Amino acid sequence: MMAPDRSDGVTSCACKGIRRCLMCEKFKGKGQLEASEPQVVHHFHYNPETGLAICKDAEAASFPFPGVFLWENFISEEEERELINTMDQDVWNQSQSGRRKQDFGPKVNFKKRKVRVGGFSGLPALSQKLVLRMQQEPSLAGFQPVEQCNLDYHPQRGSSIDPHLDDSWLWGERLVTINMLSNTTLTMSLEQGLPELGLGEEVRVAVHLPRRSLVVLYGEARHRWKHAIHREDVHERRVCSTYRELSAEFLLGGQQAELGVQLLNIALSFQGTPI
């Protein structure tokens, strides 16, 4: 089924609460977003070759930043075209903060900790070869995604995603994202700072994501540092696919291992359509 709107998706929005995009700001105003910005932020950028977070203004020492793996040119230009063309044949649903999304995964109520198979039919067919390629990387050995979420960002919508930690009840250790159509910056943040390094205020580490690259978050970058895509870092249309694996509770020996087997069997059939 063809998507009803244009590739830029400038039609309407689905923002709720304090979330805003450029479309709804015309009517709702900007709210308290600016007021919530911290007055002091220590800015660093991540060097994938050294694994260090390097201070932009040299006022603070560099420090090791564990839990990030970057794989440049993970997909080819031809694969990127094929993936985007296939995604654009499906409906993009409006999401918060100016994003659009396509979900391939079970229905989940995180507050009540309930998982429902629902209409979940698996990951999309084109992901099969990508998952096999991921598994060749030692840090992704044994990676079996049970959910894929495609997100579409566009500067005309003011697309962004707020700083957040992904759920760790259902989703496991590694978060894997393929970045497509444009370069962007993934901002990692620690609101309480790093007092052990003399940084008492918020610390942010900018991780540059080249077009067609893959990034993995694990360890401290997964569980301690929040991650975000800020509006000012979306310069052109950007599409990403994020893959998530199951937590230990849903794997062999876990309390919900039986459900985990069912979810994996569906996911890895690679016959999915968006739900």
Image (tube, rainbow, N blue to C red):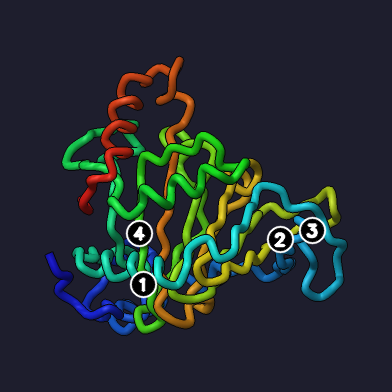
| Cα distance between the residues tagged 2 and 4 | 25 Å
Q: Which residue is mark 1?
A: 81
**Vertical placement of residue 210 versus 245, above or below:** below
In the image, 197: left or right of 94?
right
Q: Which residue is mark 4?
A: 150
| Residues at discs 1 and 4 in contact (Cβ within 8 Å) | no
| Cα distance between the residues tagged 1 and 2 | 26 Å
Q: Which residue is mark 3?
A: 50
**Vertical placement of residue 159 versus 103, above or below:** below
| Cα distance between the residues tagged 3 and 4 | 30 Å
Query: N-terminal of the two: label 2 or label 4?
Result: 2
**Vertical placement of residue 196 versus 248, above or below:** below
Q: Residue at x 20, y 67 (%)?
A: 89
- Residue 114: image location, x then y, percent: 29, 31
Q: Residue at x 23, y 63 (%)?
A: 93
205 and 47: which one is in front? 47
Q: Which residue is mark 2?
A: 48
Pointer 4 local density, CA inside 10 Å: few below 14, some 14–19, many at least 20: some
- The mark lying in front, picked from 1 and 4, is 1
Query: N-terminal of the two: label 3 or label 1?
Result: 3
Pointer 2 local density, CA inside 10 Å: few below 14, some 14–19, many at least 20: some
- Residue 10: image location, x then y, percent: 26, 81
